[in-house]
Image: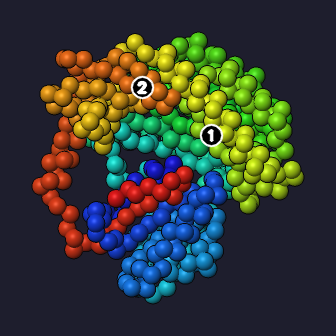
Amino acid sequence: MNVHDSERLSGLLEAAGYAPVIAGESADLLVFNTCAVRENADNKLYGNLGQLYERKLENPDFQIAVGGCLAQKDRKTIIDKAPWVDVVFGTHNIGSLPALLARAKHNGEAQIEILESLETFPSDLPTKRDSTYSAWVSISVGCNNTCTFCIVPSLRGKEKDRRPGEILAEIEALVAEGVIEVTLLGQNVNTYGVEFGDKGAFAKLLRACGNIDGLERVRFTSPHPAAFTDDVIAAMAETHNVMPQLHMPLQSGSDRILKEMKRSYRSEKYLGILDRVRKAIPDASISTDIIVGFPSETEEDFQETLRVIKESRFAICYTFQYSKRPGTPAADLPEQISKEIVQERYERLLEVVNDLAWAENKLQIGKRVEVLIGNSEGRKDDRTHRLTGRARDSRLVHINWPVELAAPRPGDLVWAEVVDAKPYFLIADAGITPEVKRTRAGDAFDAFEEASCATPVALSKPRMGVIDLNVSVKSND
């Protein structure tokens, strides 16, 4: 969600006359797009703002803006802690950023604008994608769930759905530009359609994507086990371009902890969903999210989580230590778990999930996979001569490529045989005469590269950088 918002912010700023900062040059504007799910994001934001204080003193015209979930949560606190920030804006009004920057410069004082509800759906705003072949497409924003550990509903608001026609029109426009892969994005994609009273809307949307010529791959994130229905499984299995990949957040394998989390499903139901998915899609790759150390979690609860993980045979587990977020019900629960216990359980969890991921990946050895070459990888390095991309099931694949042959372009499809497996990636061999499908996405990459070389960025324009603050700090220059 944050990456998608950052693409919109970059598009808005370029439309307003800004240009991306060139490596080695100083930006005239720096925008922090923040997350509030974990405490680490807070620390990184204020640490980064502190480092910019001297730069602001040296150049008062240098502007700093803070947006996203943390801005929605902290509001005026950001200005109190870092009065050199020029603009604070929330999750519901990213389209206001250019005007707020201009107003801050004109008035000579910080501008804070936090709306409580969405004004413009993010996909109605300009965008600048980092990828020529892949795109996010929002189908909804907000969430109607009340998970006790999660602050997102209070910051993103109640679920708001786009009409199917708008979504399909956006996808068709993206395909016309050369995009061959889309990821349908929502806080809870399974409840898509709640606003217009169609409980089967998400399955219908997946099937409709199958009718779009030129669209090679469709993914979605994130579903919720409580609302995951068999019509979605059928749509995944029967729609040719919906990928055999499912991210299904578990959070905990303990039924008692799931109840405390208000997750509204239990481990038996969860495992039943995975069984039905694998029956319909035998080669499905399934990933999940796990939280360790939720308040009152006992060793028995933790063992239940390990049991469910082992039965689920996840290809990837995204693991997190519980982070106490002020404003969430879980923050006020008794029996908060000590850092030492959480860390010890987390390390045991990592050992189990790494072993499982490696075992699942080893099952891929000998299979021939279709790999979509990544946007910036190209040759992985001069030593290995490997290309990198994603298989249909979203596994990361490094492909041994003949040294004497030109590499395919980002967006092209390559078929290769898996020859080795590691816990979080596969190694494949393209052979002496590789099978490559040149795509319109590859053509679009060539055109983009040509235009970039022919038209250098005009440095007379204000220069900007957008930084995502989530698990890590990522520059989207």
Element type at mark 1: strand
- Which numbered tag is attached to residue 319? 1
Residue 462 showing in the rendered view: yes
Which residue is painted at 20% across and 25% down in the image? 402
Q: Which residue is mark 2?
A: 426
Indicate the amino acid at tag 1: Thr
- Please name whichever residue, 118 or 303, is drawn nearer the observer in this view of the structure: 303
Q: Which residue ends up furthest to the front in the rendered image?
A: 383
Left or right: where 113 falls relative to 404? right
> Eyeballing the image, is 39 above or below 297?
below
Discs 1, 2 touching: Cβ within 8 Å: no
The image quadrant of residue 69 is bottom right
Picture coordinates of residue 46, whole percent (x, y): 56, 69
For residue 462, above or below residue 60: above
Amino acid of disc 2: Leu
Image coordinates of residue 137 in percent, x first then y, are 44, 42
**Real-space Cα distance between discs 1 and 2?**
21 Å
Residue at 43%, 86% in the rendered image: 57
Left or right of residue 345, residue 464 in this image: left
Count of residue discs: 2
